[in-house]
Amino acid sequence: MFVARHIKTEHKDLIHDVAYDFYGTRMATCSSDQTVRIWEVDHATGNWSCTACWKAHSGSVWKVTWANPEFGQVLATCSFDRTAAVWEEVVGEGNIGDKVSATHWVKRTTLVDSRTSVTDVKFAPKYLGLVLAACSADGFVRIYEAPDVMNLTQWSLQYEVSAKFSCSCIAWNPTYPRHFAPIIAVGSDDTSPDTPKVLVYEFNENLRRWNKIDSLQDVTEPVNDLSFAPNLGRSYHLLGIAGKDLKVVSLEPQGMEEDSQGATRYIVRTVAKCSEHNSTVWRVAWNITGTILASSGDDGVVRLWKGNYIGNWKLVSILRGDGTQLAMTEAGASASPFGSSPVVSSIATTSSSTATTTASRFMKFAAASGVKQDVVWH
Amino acid sequence: MKAEYKSKVFRPLVTLAPRSLAAVLSNSTPSGGELTTWSRQFFVDAPFVRNFVVAGAEVFATVQKEYKAHYPDPVPPKIVTSLSRMYRTFLLELCQNLKATGDLTSADLYSNLDFVWNFCEIMFLSSHPDFPVLPYLVDWIHLNFDLTSEILPKVVAEGSELEEETTLELWNLIYSHVFHGTTREAARLLSYLGGESASSTTQRHVALMEELLSKRPEFRPEDAASSLTEFEALFTAWQEECVNRLENGAFSGSPNFTLVCKILCGDDEAFASAVARGLITWYEYMVLLLNYKYPTIRPAQLKAYAVRTLQQLDLVDKLEARDAILLHAMDLDVVSVLREITAVWDNPWVALHLSDLIFACGRSSISTSAQKQRRGDDASFDFACVVPLRNDFLLEYGTTLMEHETLWQMGLCYLDALPDGKGRPVIRTCFQHRNPFSEQEAQKLVQIAERYGFGDEIKGICRQICLSKLKRGGSSQAQNALLWAIKAGDEALTTRIVDKILFEGDAQIDVALLDALLANVLDASLAFLHEFSIFRRAVSEGRGRDGVVSLCSMIKRGVIPKRLAIKILSKNESIFDDGSNFEGDDVTTLMEYVQRTLVTQRGDDYNSEEERQVTDLNRKLIKIRAYRIMCEFRRKATGAEEEEEDSNTEFVYGEADDY
């Protein structure tokens, strides 16, 4: 069961991104008003309040993203002003958990390598260190690293990969690399029909370079967002793609097979294509275990999808902007889940003697009409 | 500005977090877009549910123990059934608690769940596919529809002189026991009708009926193997006796006794009139039918009789979700049962624990086709789905619990139960999202991470706390941060903090921290820190001689970082105040070190303060050397070693200054 809360963001222009921190206790929003706002939940009441707001760029701020808390309270933003920036929260003296009154966010660095609008920034999974990927409309993916986590003013450009298309979004594969090399997917909102729309790169440790491993031929429409599912034991990766509709693509590495460039071979399959939004899908996001995928579309709702135990993807819930929720379960429409009074479900003929039985335990089952039916069939 | 213009087109946003979801679905300007968050409400936080969940987890842990103890054999049905009853006990307890507080809606829900679970227990766990299911159904109906506790006290209170209304109620109670198949209970109740005030005819009827009811053969599942044939013979003989009594007019003149006898004889017309006698649910009617007409049907045949009952009562089109679940259970269609239960209750608690019991019972390993062949029916036995379904439920329930603020450790037990170590990566991921919001919580997390061997996570938690403390500043925070850095096993970070404490700070370390360092720093790369701790401990305790030994040892082994040398020597200069702390070549070692490290190698790279410190240090060392020479000189001169030692300490420093 979910409880909806509405927050007036007070951004003076369109909001372009909202991002939870690692634990879901803070949020960051960014907007065309060039500001970033930080929101913090009050655990007692569940209410969110704005704890910081600052002008982050001199153009629209497209994306905001949190670093793993292991590196401190660190944010990255990217903007139409052709830069990406890294921000760190500075706090006063006090113990962990204390309510610190004087906190403020300090710009640690501005990354100025792009010649055009920087369209997305994402921190790498923490096993790679404090690493940030940024992609830009000029078709480059740039990977930066802060070698010293205590000094976030120093970032070095480690790799610059030319995607050769206007990049709109980027996603890291969060899977811990016991069996897999680091992977990045880059999406393009280029409308020309001949260019690929998603490129997937894999990092080759020996050659120290990013190799292109696939260009997802199945995806032919402009891509607005990408997100890899956390992989908790699958032999393949799942990539959620928001475009004209919602797609889930699996990438299955083929053992130790490598091509001439030293890149692993992958079998790529589209495992789900969901058109229920009936409109453009703008965002995709996974839960932490990679079992539920959320998508938002121009139809103004969030849809939750779940792969069942035999791998079929089903729509399990629809969340509306007014906070209401529609469950997709079979009995979802019924007001009383177990049925109305058992009297109705039993012998139709009743007699005067039924009065004596109304005291039985079973008769008190009555209608469990207050029960919520939110989610989720497997 | 093309892209800027493009940004004016609103795009709906969504993001997910461990317990919540946030979305921007309307973006009106200029007031700013509205952000909507959906936070998950844990059913655990509802009144009484916490204890219920904890108790359920305890039974679950017992089931896993039993499963492991019996593996590779399945857990015997008797044990599984008793564990199933424990789960149901908690359901009923919760139901009672909720009723007591007036939350009837929730109480109804749990009551329904128990009713359905009880039936599923019969179909999937306790009944044997080759033996009659009736005894279990009799218990099920009796448990759910028995009115004795409500009517009997009234009857007992009125004694032998029953009022007409009470007599009617007593007869309804007797009928209900007869319908439900608890005939011995019915026989006992008859005695209230045959008291001294009753007519002799009634007394005779009561005696006869008591005999018939008491004699009704009952099939005992526990000794089923030997007595099934015998039971069938006994039942036929008993029913023949009932028919004879009826035909002989043994109950003539008494419509109630006649009707009861007709029911015992399995008379369809009598069954029909049972409806008018307060038998109001189709479950009861079905069991009535089985009690007196088909007492030996097997579990897989039950569906046919249920359908017949529903048709007879014209209820086929009026089925509720509860009825649908029961019918699926009769089909042994475990997938549909679990799906329906989950559909009516947004919680995998029942579905998970039920599927886990079925899994433990090993019914899931029974070959589908072999079962069908053996039973010779067309029931659907889709037990193969139990394993993936159980895994799915475990995953969902386990991860849900792991997101809870206080009960998260219980989630471990469920995720651990996933086969082939599949739970480990899930636990790791959920674990990573636990916020070490306090040092205490961090300690707890580290402890559990150690249990699972999550080295990276331990490192992560410790680093997080360490960085958080460092960034808050202050020397006490830095020293605490050092402990966390050591725990994290992060050498670079440890070295940095040591520098911070020793170089930027005043080179003092708390005694408590020293103890911790001595206990923890075993790594060769931290040899300096270890030795420095010993040195500091000696100095802080005023053991000057030990301090000098330790310092010389560090110098000889070359472990003192050069940048720290001057600080260490100048900040601990109390050991230079007493010449007797030095023996042998200690002074030479120190003088050479000061000359080599602080003067020759550093050259002019000193500020005035450091320059003064080096000069001061040199002066003190020269003084000590003078003292050592004087001591030696006097010792030789007097030849009285003891006298020399006693007297020297008093005057040496004044004399050394002169020297």
Image (cartoon, helix red, strand yellow):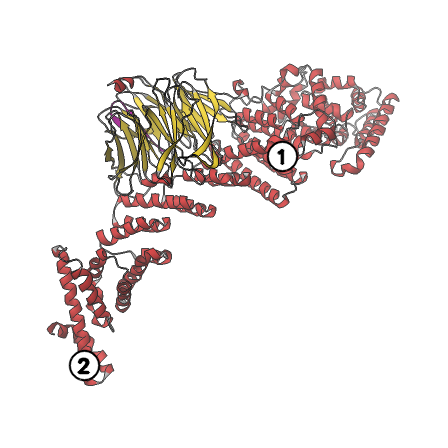
- Residue A27 falls inside the magenta stretch: yes
Q: Is residue B241 left or right of residue B406?
A: right
Q: Is residue B471 left or right of residue A236?
A: left
Residue under the point 12% across and 72% down: B657
On the image, the x and y values in percent for residue B121 come to 64, 32
- Residue B219 falls inside the magenta stretch: no
Residue at the spot of label 1? B358
Q: Is residue B637 left or right of residue A51?
A: left
Q: Nearer the viewer, residue B422 or B100?
A: B422
* Secondary structure of residue under mark 1: helix
Residue at the spot of label 2? B634
Q: Is residue B515 visible?
A: yes
Residue stretch rendered in magenta on the structure: A25-36
Quarter occupied by residue A142: top left
Which chain is disc 2 placed on? B
On the image, the x and y values in percent for residue A378 come to 53, 27
From the viewer's perspective, is residue A29 above or below residue B600?
above
Residue type, label 1: Ile
Q: Is residue A97 visible?
A: no
Q: Nearer the viewer, residue B537 or A258?
A: A258
Which chain is disc 1 placed on? B
Labels 1 and 2 in the same subunit: yes
Q: Is residue B547 left or right of residue A341?
A: left
Residue under the point 37% across and 33% down: A211
